[in-house]
Amino acid sequence: MSRREGGRGRAPNLRSSIYLSETDGLWHGWVTMGLKDNGAPDRRHRTGKTETEVTRKVRELEAKRDAGKVDRPGRAPTVEQWMTTYLNDIAARKLAPTTLESYWSDTRNWIIKHLGKHRLDRLQAEHLDKLYTRMLNEGKKPSHVLKVHRILSRALEIARRRGRVGENVAKQVDSPGAGDEEIEPLTQTEARRILAAAERRRNGSRWSVALALGLRQGEALGLRWKYVDLDGGSVRVWWQISRLKWRHGCDDVTACTEGKHRRACPKNCPKARRKAGRPHKCILPTAERLCPKNCDRHASTCPNRVGGGLVFRPPKGKSKRTIPLPPELIPILKAHRTKQKMERLAAANVWEDHDLVFCQPNGRPIDPRDDWDDWKDLLSQAGVRDARVHDGRHTAGTLLIEQGVHVRTVQEILGHSDIRLTQRYTHVATPMAADGMQSMGRALWGSQP
């Protein structure tokens, strides 16, 4: 670092300089941080009333430079601006559409809402701590907080790599613990009652596949006959059905969404289908608007909407797999295929051939929401407690462990990318574990030979 007075003289290249200006009476400091995109030196300027103050500021910049934590020249974007850039232009190339939509939802509701106005280079670890504490205080699960943390941490890491910030402050925060997700599988007795009730229903074998193979909802609804080998007794889970979000195809989004924004439903709303705490397009003019002013949603009502609806996509993560079929399931699927051929003949030219194992009476894919309703109705008919569609997958995993199947094999059948997900089912007492403890009892208290 060199010191000059009155602005006279010149410091060597790449050396910091401090001088007292005769023009304004202030001390000035210049630090060379590197090179700009055009090859010119990136010189940062600091001022202060005293030499000590400017010296401190210059040394802070030098420390950042020497540690490789140099911010890009120019004004840093806000958290809102960077998250928008990250999700739209960076993450969108790799994430599945449904995952991207989920990320956007958490980003809008938590990251942008509570951190969006902060400049990216001035975001502090304490800001993240306050956000996570607020989420927990509002009843959000630790796993949800962890998801938000990972979204933000990844965005900040990309910003660091590209010189937007000097460091990723999310790494200074202890990752919120996800905790062990509590699963509520159905019992073997409940599963049998469901299958008995499903025998009398159209597409009843859909639930035989769910409880026997543990397929995700999209994997089961996207299953096609070309991937089912009933003679060899196996099924290839290579595709799933996903519902993608519609996008506006109109020129004026503001005009297209006029009058369609969601509003909080007050107690005196006369709308018959009002549900407590659930927002909708309320007809009362005094209702509080929930959508932001620049809302570009509601694309499903756009007359020129594009890119949405039900589509076939590869399964989640590394879940592409081949699963052996239980011998008892093969005749059930054969009978289902015979019934479907009869439906196809009855539908004639109305039939849309997608080669789906489970479809509507006209051959079109089953909407996941209709599938959910069918499951709830089946539970009621079978006299079984309420459960989610995904709990059928948990049931399959738990039953496999109960039958003594090794956890690694269960991982392969369910398509888990991480063995820790499969180990959630090992809380059950398998027959092998029971036999082992009986042997332990005999060893400690049984008669000696």
Image (spheres, rainbow, N blue to C red):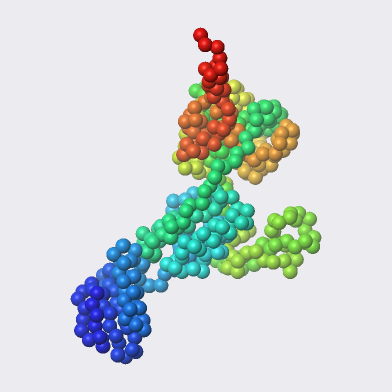
Q: Residue at x 58, y 68 (%)?
A: 294
Q: Residue at x 28, y 80 (%)?
A: 18
Residue 176 vertical placement versus 59 (above, below): above
Number of callouts: 0
In-front residue for pair 389/225:
389
The residue lying at 53 percent from left, 40 percent from top is 240
Relative to the observer, which residue lies in front, 54 or 188? 54
Tell me if residue 30 comes above or below residue 377 in the rendering. Answer: below
Q: Residue at the top extreme?
A: 449
**Where is residue 38 shown, x and y percent of the image?**
28, 70
**Where is 230 relative to 292, above or below?**
above
Residue 5: image x %, image y %?
25, 86
Against 11, residue 6 (above or below) is: below
Q: Is 56 left or right of 397, judged from the image as shown? A: left
| Occupied quadrant, residue 366 | top right
In percent of width and height, residue 379 lies at 71, 35
Q: Is residue 334 visible?
A: no
In the displayed structure, does residue 286 sit left or right of residue 308?
Answer: right
Please name whichever residue, 121 or 1, is drawn nearer the observer in this view of the structure: 1
| Quadrant position of the N terminus in the picture | bottom left
The structure residue drawn at horizontal position 77% and vertical position 61%, both measured from the top left corner, is 267
Q: Nearer the viewer, residue 83 or 310?
A: 83
**Residue 284 sits in which quadrant?**
bottom right
For residue 310, say whether it is visible: yes
